[in-house]
Amino acid sequence: MWVIYKKELTTFFNNLTGYLVLGVFLTVMGLFLFVFPETSLLESNFASLEPFFEMAPSLFLFLVPAITMRLLAEERQLGTLALLLTKPIDEMGLVIGKFLAAVSLLFLALVPTLFYYITLYFLGSPVGNLDTGAIMGSYLGLLLLGSAFASIGMLASSLTESQIVAFVLAVTGCFLFFYGFYFLSGLPVFFGKWDALVQQFGMDYHYHALSKGAPDTRDLIYFLSVIAIFLLITRFVLQYRIRS
């Protein structure tokens, strides 16, 4: 598993993938948070990173699938998937190794954004006038959300040899699980009766719950369960593809 992890992480930075992900994410967020006046943190009357945590999931909807689209699709396209499994590693080890590499890249993308926190910390009046607990909870939620998106992307990548198709499938799946249940709860059949319950099946609900600064074990269990389910399904898909 760790051999696969190191291989994938090295691959990310031996080509443009890793640098593009980091560069695009930080450039887009920097423009929205410090350049565009409508969303600039410097134009706000309050020291808050809420705009960052509101925009980041939408950006992750495209960045995470861009990371995961090649992880398994490329192996199938090149015919190296079966070869990898001849080594002392099983399907689950392969899936987890590649998944952890994708999550590590996401983590590296988030580390530089601590600059936003430091900037607001010293610009606050008085200095340090920030809800640090809520910010740390939001960072945890964002990392868990990105990990859940990565698990969906892994499944999408296992279903096809085409990286483009894998990207489209992953974006669609991430969108449905993040926004889908919120929109579904607004239907007349649910609204006013079961809408709150339906929303709890979506990632959006649990992501925003974590941003309150007091992580609830139910939110953590939700994300970990989603990740585990999609990784297990990915393993079954690989087993089926290899044996068929």
Image: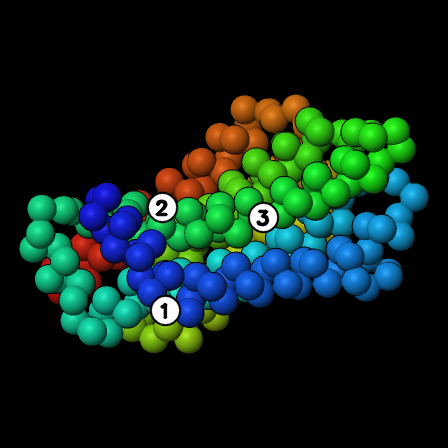
- The circle on residue 132 is none
The quarter of the rendered structure image containing the C terminus is bottom left
Q: Secondary structure at mark 3?
A: helix
Specify whether 67 is left or right of 38. left
Disc 2 to disc 1: CB gap under 8 Å? no
Specify whether 95 is left or right of 138. left
Of the residues shown, which amino acid type is indicated by label 2? Leu
Depth check, front residue: 79 or 125: 125
Q: Does residue 170 appear in the picture of this structure?
A: no
Between the C-alphas of marks 1 and 3, the distance is: 21 Å
Identify the residue shown where x is 15% and y is 47%: 90
Of the residues shown, which amino acid type is indicated by label 3? Pro
Identify the residue shown where x is 42% and y is 47%: 104
- The circle on residue 15 is 1
The answer to which image quadrant residue 47 occupies is top right
63 vs 225: above or below: below
Disc 1 to disc 3: CB gap under 8 Å? no
Depth check, front residue: 105 or 115: 115
Identify the residue shown where x is 79% and y is 62%: 35
Of the residues shown, which amino acid type is indicated by label 1? Asn
Give residue 16's position: percent from left, percent from top.
42, 69
Give residue 146's position: percent from left, percent from top.
51, 48
Specify whether 138 is left or right of 158. right
The answer to which image quadrant residue 18 occupies is bottom left
- The circle on residue 112 is 3
Looking at marks 2 and 3 on the same chain, the residue that comes earlier in the sequence is marked by 2
89 vs 200: above or below: below
Q: Secondary structure at mark 2?
A: helix
Between the C-alphas of marks 2 and 1, the distance is: 18 Å
Say which residue label 2 marks: 100
- For the residue carrying disc 2, how many other residues have a C-alpha within 10 Å: few (<14), some (14-19), or many (20+)? many
